[in-house]
Amino acid sequence: MSANILAIFYLISGVLFILALRGLSSPETSRQGNLFGIIGMAIAVGVTILSVGNFSIGFLYLMVFLLIGGSIGAFIAFKIPMTAMPELVAGFHSLVGLAAVFVAISAFLSPDVFNLGSPGNIKIASLIEMSLGAAIGAITFTGSIIAFLKLRGIMSGSPIVFFGQHYLNLFLGLSLIGLIYYLCLNQSNSLFWTIIAISLIVGVFLIIPIGGADMPVVISMLNSYSGWAAAGIGFTLENTALIITGALVGSSGAILSYIMCKGMNRSFFNVILGGWGATDDKTKDNSKEQKPVKNGNADDAAFLMKNASSVIIVPGYGMAVAQAQHALREMVDALKKNGVKVTYAIHPVAGRMPGHMNVLLAEANVPYDEVFELEEINNDFANCDVAYVIGANDVTNPVAKSDPQSPIYGMPILDVEKSKSVLFVKRSLSPGYAGIDNDLFYRDNTLMLFADAKKMTEDIIKSL
Amino acid sequence: MEIDPFVFRLSIFILSIFIGYYVVWSVTPSLHTPLMSVTNAISSVIIVGAIIAALAGDNLNVFQTSNIFGFLAIILAAVNIFGGFLVTQRMLAMYKKKKKDK
């Protein structure tokens, strides 16, 4: 196959990947979009195998390895519970990162295969591209593993900070640039390995200071990195499909990070440089004298909601932890039978990854046209009778609007305090991730329901 | 004067970033999780590099160092490709509209 025809096929798969993302603009077109993505991938893999044209024993191994990887992937995809989606995505990112590192290593060891020169005499441009691809890939790899461990709960979600951390990161970053420069001068193997090793360390240091609730930003950021790593390799291999895909994924992750940061009213650097939990000890200490709260039970909640004309559900990470989405749907069905109008309100940073709540609600068969984003629904709280807050906290805290001293000041919040009454399902009075007390708990129109989110919701169903 | 092919690739790259920018902003927020899993799947197109690396060299000695890295990368990328697309498919199948009747 001529190089030109090959390039055209890669272009076609690049375009199909664009259509795959384009399809996600609405749930109706999304499934077709995914199909485009699969076709694009099949084309890219197929023409690459044909172009190499080596159908000997190596091809057999290729098929075997493809099958092994494919079955593992398919097995995971069918078995994974939807609540584990954030970990899964983090885990997948790490694999892309590592694959990029491996391809860069092969290209460095056998540059002749990729027409990049001979070992020890690789084109300078290719050398820069492959070392960038390898470095970003390595950072993505270890960074995603740390994110995975934190999301899975194997590693504590609280930020790990130590003195001079940022300077150390800066130093490591600069030394990477220096090493790549020297690599271009003498093309030594050991320099190349050092670059990869340092990048692996940078990946760890980059993610450990970031706290659990900032994970939406971290996952999006690593998503972006995996794209840039792919693009770096794409330049090395002079492959259009990889360059297009890398750019798409890179900008997609960057936009998601931006949306997540905006959802918390924080700058990207503020998130990267460390979590709230570490810096805001002050706000925790001056916890005010124990104020009275209204403590309710399932019967009270059922009574309130049954007699309401409209209810807005505000889900948060707590719902995911308790796996309460199915119970929640049943409760809503029961309410609807009583003629109550029910909608869902999702804050951009609810959960541990972008769109986390939406997927869980979709899993529980909640129609997606009953689920609204912050801007769409925020005005409706003033006309709603009951807001049912399940597993969310900081995203409803009115202090974000009133107190300039508060660390979450300026963060857009769901205006649940405007509804006639608020039901808060929570395990205890403890403050949320930001370590700030939520005024809402102590208001007259708030009823606290202290229980596990799932259990409380099930109890309410019984009382309805 | 001839233009270095690198410049063409750079142009493709930059323009793709812009396409990505506009396409991703039009993605509905409720599909952000599938967006992440599908971008993850398509970025595994890095497998083309792995295939070239794995199949390179002479046929008698299939497992030279660079081939081994190629094969390893194939496994990793294949996990991602199948896992990514299938889990996206599974998620997207769950998004349903309200039933009209009632």
Image: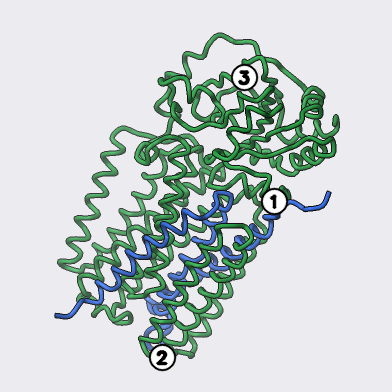
Chain colours: A green, B blue
Instruction: Name the residue that disc number 3 marks.
Output: A441
Mark positioned earlier in the residue sequence (1 or 2): 2
Amino acid at circle 2: Met
Above/below status of A402 relative to A250:
above
Residue A350 in view (yes/no): no
Q: Mark on residue A129? A: none
Please say if A402 is above or below A222.
Answer: above
Q: Chain of mark 3?
A: A
Quadrant for the N terminus of chain B, please: bottom left
- Report the residue marked by disc 2: A1
In space, the residues marked 1 and 2 are separated at their CA atoms by 45 Å
Q: Quadrant of residue A393?
A: top right
Q: Is label 3 in a helix, a strand or a loop?
A: helix
Residue A40 falls left or right of residue A452: left
The amino acid type found where label 3 is placed reads Phe
Question: Quick one: A186 or A40, which is closer to the camera?
Answer: A40
Q: Gap in Å between the C-alphas at discs 1 and 3?
A: 30 Å
A439 vs B37: above or below: above
Answer few, some or many: residues within 10 Å of disc 1's Cα (few below 14, many 20 plus, some between 14 and 19): many
Whether tag 1 and tag 3 are in contact, CB under 8 A, the answer is no
Q: Is residue A362 visible?
A: yes
Amino acid residing under circle 1: Glu
Q: Are marks 1 and 2 in contact (CB under 8 Å)?
A: no
Residue behind mark 1: A363
Helix, strand or loop status at disc 2? loop
User: Looking at the picture, do discs 1 and 2 lie on one chain?
Assistant: yes
Chain under numbered label 1: A
Lower sequence index among marks 1 and 3: 1
Tell me residue A229's x, y (percent). 37, 61
CA gap, disc 3 and disc 2: 69 Å
Q: Are marks 3 and 2 on the same chain?
A: yes
A115 on left or right of A376: left
